[in-house]
Amino acid sequence: MTSHPIVWAIDLYQENTRMWKRSKELAACVSRTLGQPLQPVYISDTAFFRPLSSDLATKVKQAKDSSRTRMKRLLKPLHDSEVNEPAVLQAFGFNEEVEAKKVGRYAIRSKAPLILAATEGRRGLARAIGGSFVETLVAKSRVPVLLVNQESRPVREIRNIVFVTDLSRASNLAFKKICDFALAANARIEVLSILPDPALWGAELAAPVGVGYSANIPSFASEKKRLKRIGDRLVRLGREKGLDVSLALESNQSASVVSAILDSESVSDANLLAIAATRDTSKLHFFGSVAQEVIRRSPIPVWTCRVGT
């Protein structure tokens, strides 16, 4: 079998032991599930070195060697057969976008099926000030990114995948890629779409539209039928690929779409949640998108795929 290593972006100086434990558990699980080795990658930023220093090359080499040694020590508990020789990529300037693009390009060159990373799930002011390499990676990478946060429960196997979609054309482009992942993992997929609360839908229809205007809004029942037709097409597409695929349309009776997703029975029984990243949200610090909030709060690992521009 041709080896296409899973790129594993590692923060060597991560002090959150719980998150590091979850990251190692997921890395070992995915490597075992896909039958592919892990390729640990670390970005060594040399911005603190004087650019015109006569011994710059020596200092850069020393920094890389030190990072590689530290990575080997961290990865020692994993089996050698699962882990390739660690790679240290050089960056300059402490720029998360540059670093994310470097990891993304490395994954493309390696023909990696995905990039694995861990996120602290920072929100609000902490996110605005400190930024997030992981969320920038999700927004920029052309290779799917698999994420785990510190609140995720342990994952020993990947057998049930929930693909969350608004059933838009952009989101459904990601479905083909999660099908490829599910085939490799021998996993089933449940397509989950969250519909508005019927009571709220009715209230919106009853609201005045304005003089001279008419409301051409479909009923909740007709909209649900339309979305079911789209969902059924995805189910047929997955089954044609030989996958066990089902569809779940659930009404949103929570305070938010994200809460409705994470409170769903489908997610509670799943090993992996998949969602499309449909826009560049790397600069949206305080509000973000549904995908961002799912990544930050999900109790299980999240597979994401950037679609569109």
Image (cartoon, rainbow, N blue to C red):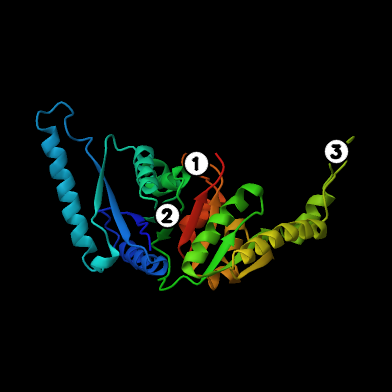
Q: Around disc 3, counting alpha carbons within 10 Å, would you say few (fewer than 14), some (14 to 19), or many (20 or more)?
A: few
The mark found on residue 121 in the picture is 2
* Residue 229 visible in this rendered orientation of the protein: yes
Q: Position of residue 199 (x, y in %)?
A: 77, 60
x and y, in percent, of residue 181 in the image? 49, 61
Q: Nearer the viewer, residue 7 or 155?
A: 7
Quadrant housing the C terminus: top right
Tag 2–tag 1 contact (CB < 8 Å) = no
**Mark 2 Cα-neighbour bin, 10 Å: few <14, some 14–19, many ≥20:** many
* Residue named by callout 1: 284
In primary-sequence order, the first of circles 2 and 3 is: 2
Q: CA distance from mark 1 to mark 3?
A: 33 Å
Residue 100 relative to residue 68: left or right: right
- State the separation of the CA atoms marked 2 and 3: 43 Å
Vertical relation: 247 (above or below) 133: below
Residue occupying image coordinates x 41% and y 69%:
33
* Residues at circles 1 and 3 in contact by the CB criterion of under 8 Å: no
Q: Comparing marks 1 and 3, which lies closer to the viewer?
A: 1
Give the amino acid at mark 1. Answer: Leu
Residue lying at 20% horizontally and 35% vertically, measured from the top left: 48
Disc number placed over residue 249 in the picture, else none:
none
Residue found farthest to the right: 212
Q: Which SS class for mark 2?
A: loop
Kindly identify the residue that appears in the image at 52 percent across and 60 percent down: 180
- The amino acid at mark 3 is Gly
On the image, the x and y values in percent for residue 231 come to 69, 60
Residue that numbered label 3 is attached to? 210
Evaluate whether residue 292 shows in this view. Answer: no
Q: Amino acid at mark 2?
A: Gly
